């Protein structure tokens, strides 16, 4: 176990060392995050009324938890592309030839993505604060929300690992992940209240993991959350999000390890 942890941390460090060597990865991720904040807060924000919250700036406080959740969900695409790129360049084969735990390759990738997304979240939170977002609860609630985001990022990385192992080309990995993630992010309460959606879409959006994560952050941080349904997902968003985290880790962790072993043969 000690050797496995050590090997996982070494692979994690190797993945993080790509950031200073390829700074464009972090630069464009930061610029994209800031662009989303500016676009939705200042361009669309004035045209989207928030029911029950007439005060100025209410939509920006409503929006930012959704931006955080969207960023974490889309992080799976970065994981998938990175895994596919390593396979194409033969790095995964090189790892398999080394005397390290095989599980360290996947675990190290997921840990490095959590650290990477933590840095992106810091930039997003600073940008959101400048745009008018704030936390209206205490420090412990703020810390709980951050931990929930990072835990969700860890679970989404396993989805990205599985999709990356399935794809044969980086272009395919990018297209497949975005095709999978777009419904999860936009058919949700991240950008508009659930009552603004058609009736036939609302149940899916209400149970959507992006929606439960977004509602959890709004509840923990005291941000506006105008629609609360009677379902378990709406009444207990934090608990439902933890359930989704467990499901993602168990299901896609199992599928990812199984696929990785198949490649090893």
Image (cartoon, rainbow, N blue to C red):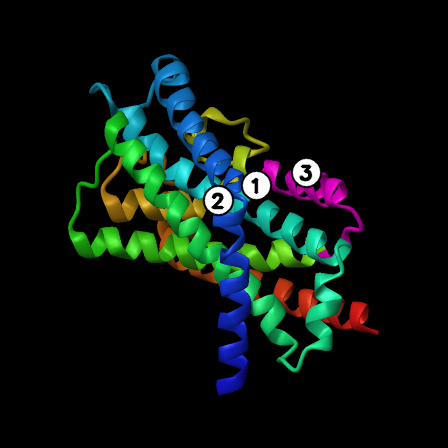
Residue 183 sits inside the magenta stretch:
yes
Local SS, label 3: helix
Label at residue 184: 1
Residue 121's x, y, as percent? 37, 44
The quarter of the displayed image where residue 91 is located: bottom right
Mark 1 closeness class: few <14, some 14–19, many ≥20 residues within 10 Å: many
Tag 1 near tag 2, CB within 8 Å: yes
Which part of the image, by quadrant, shows the C terminus?
bottom right
Label 3 to label 1: alpha-carbon separation: 10 Å
Q: Residue at x 75, y 55 (%)?
A: 89
Mark 3 closeness class: few <14, some 14–19, many ≥20 residues within 10 Å: few
Q: Which contiguous range is marked in magenta?
A: 165-184
For the residue pair 89 and 108, the one nearer the viewer reads as 89
Label at residue 179: 3
For the residue pair 244 and 259, the one nearer the viewer reads as 259
Residue at the front extreme? 21
Local SS, label 2: helix
Q: Residue at x 43, y 25 (%)?
A: 35
Q: Earlier in the sequence, mark 2 or mark 3?
A: 3
Q: Residue at x 72, y 74 (%)?
A: 96
Residue 63's x, y, as percent? 36, 31
Label 1 to label 2: alpha-carbon separation: 6 Å
Q: Is residue 144 found left or right of 153 in the rendered image?
A: left
Which residue matches tag 2?
210
């Amino acid at each position: 176990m000690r050797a496995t942890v050590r090997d996982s941390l070494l692979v994690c460090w190797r993945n993080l060392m790509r950031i200073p060597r390829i700074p464009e990865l972090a630069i464009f991720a930061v610029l994209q995050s800031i662009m989303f904040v500016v676009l939705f807060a200042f361009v669309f924000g004035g045209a989207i009324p928030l029911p029950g919250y007439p005060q100025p700036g209410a939509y920006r406080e409503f929006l930012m938890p959704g931006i955080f959740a969207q960023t974490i969900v889309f992080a799976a695409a970065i994981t998938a592309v990175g895994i596919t790129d390593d396979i194409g360049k033969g790095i995964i084969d090189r790892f398999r030839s080394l005397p390290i735990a095989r599980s360290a390759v996947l675990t190290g990738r997921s840990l490095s993505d959590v650290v990477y997304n933590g840095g992106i979240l810091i930039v997003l939170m600073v940008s959101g604060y400048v745009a008018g977002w704030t936390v209206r609860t205490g420090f412990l609630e703020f810390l709980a929300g951050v931990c929930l985001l990072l835990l969700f990022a860890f679970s989404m990385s396993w989805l990205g690992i599985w999709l990356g192992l399935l794809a044969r080309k980086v272009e395919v990995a990018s297209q497949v992940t975005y095709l999978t993630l777009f419904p999860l992010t936009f058919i949700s309460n991240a950008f508009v209240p659930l009552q603004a959606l058609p009736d036939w879409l609302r149940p899916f959006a209400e149970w959507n993991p992006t929606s439960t994560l977004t509602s959890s952050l709004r509840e923990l941080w005291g941000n506006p959350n105008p629609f609360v349904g009677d379902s378990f997902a709406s009444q207990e968003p934090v608990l439902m999000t933890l359930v989704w985290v467990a499901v993602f880790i168990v299901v896609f962790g199992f599928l990812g390890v199984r696929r990785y072993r198949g490649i090893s043969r």
